[in-house]
Amino acid sequence: MIAWRRDIHQNPELGNQETRTAALVADHLRRLGYDVRERVGGTGVVAVLRGAAGPGPVVALRADMDALPVAEPQSTPFASRVRATWDGAEVPVMHACGHDCHTAILMAAAEVLAAHRGALRGAVKLIFQPAEEGLPRGEIGGARRMIDEGAFADPKPDMVFGLHVVSALPTGTLAYRPGAALASSDEFRIVVTGRQTHAAFPWAGVDPIVVAAQIVSALQTIESRQVNISEPSVLSVATVNGGNRANIIPDRVTMTGTLRTMSEERRVFMKRRVQEIIQSIAAGMDAAAQLEWLPNGYAITVNNPDLTARMLPSLQRVAGSDQVRLGPPIMATEDFSFFAEQAPGLFFLVGVTPRDQDPGRAAPNHSPRFTVDESGLLVGLRALLHLVADTAGQLA
């Protein structure tokens, strides 16, 4: 498992480019006797192991395979030196979120389950997913595309499990949350149009930079003044682009950002208020503003409460009751959410920061300094295996 992780880490691939990783996975699963389908949702792999011990539930296990456009410090022998093209630009590539770990864990789970096929009731469906980190220009991929292309068909899972390694927890610790566990995400683009003029004569035009600045400030009052802060949500403007000369006021400014919420009601309200605020500010300053919500947003990740309660003893058996934590809502997002809309789901977190270090000071996922205590992979592997074994007594 660790050898697979290091190999995948040294050869990372961006979303919908995971051809090497997918081939490694598919070859491994075929050798184990799985029925394998490739190129599902782009580069995804779906594999089914049908048990020989009679009827039982269909349990799906999911791992994501893609890396991020991040430059990795050359601090380990298996550090990435890979570069790739992303949205038309050449970028460095690194497994800065741990998807290499997820893939290796599920490959190891596949091997253990195949060895116990004779005792397996029902079936296990393994889903190796591309493009969890999203795709450029609003392209829809990942879990949604895999579902559209039949990942949850023939057989349809009765439940689905997934995990994510995190540096915010010490090695050996598992965290879960019933109900809404991870936020939705919606990416937006705002174009503010003014009237270009000489910077010495601003009254002769309409300055979209000033309008954009007012919009950025006003949007923050939605969270600080218009919603109950006991329910978390985040609205962030992350890029602002306009102009190319210090002495020219430009025609337009383009801004992009993200909205994260923990309920559909909050999501709908904040989307409406963003539209109303940008339109009113632009009109009041003699400008125009156009808002676009990109179509590749992610739903809220909801852990089925009944399934979570039923499987909690399995997690506690693996890590020990004192090492399984009820986590807070997390404003990060996961397209595992779409799988959990198709069948009852449980998504949990696996700590990978050594116990002699402070997780609060560890570099977070998506940082170039993100590191993994590989002994944590065994905890994740055992958790998946126990979840399968304990699901309706699936192993005879």
Image: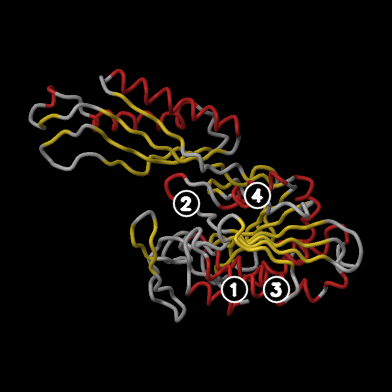
> Which callout, 2 or 1, points at the residue further toward the start of the chain?
1
Secondary structure at numbered mark 1: helix
Above or below for 52 versus 310: below
Q: Position of residue 5 (x, y in %)?
A: 56, 74
Three-letter amino acid code at the position of disc 3: Arg
Q: Amino acid at mark 1?
A: Leu
Task: Between residue 294 and residue 237, name the one nearer to us.
Answer: 294
Q: How far apart are the two marked residues, 4 and 2, measured between alpha carbons?
A: 17 Å
Residue at the spot of label 3 = 30
Mark identifier at residue 309: none
Marks 1 and 3: in contact by CB < 8 Å? no
As drawn, the label of residue 135 is: 2
Question: In the picture, residue 250 is in which quadrant?
Answer: top left
Mark 3 or mark 2, whichever is nearer to me: 3
Residue for badge 4: 147
Which amino acid, mark 2? Leu
What is the distance, in whole Å, between disc 3 and disc 2 at their CAs? 29 Å
* Residue kind at label 4, given as amino acid type: Ile
The local crowd at label 4, few if under 14, some if 14 to 19, many if 20 or more residues have their Cα within 10 Å, is some
> Residue tagged by mark 1?
24
Lower position in the chain sequence, tag 1 or tag 4: 1
Residue closer to the observer: 81 or 308: 81
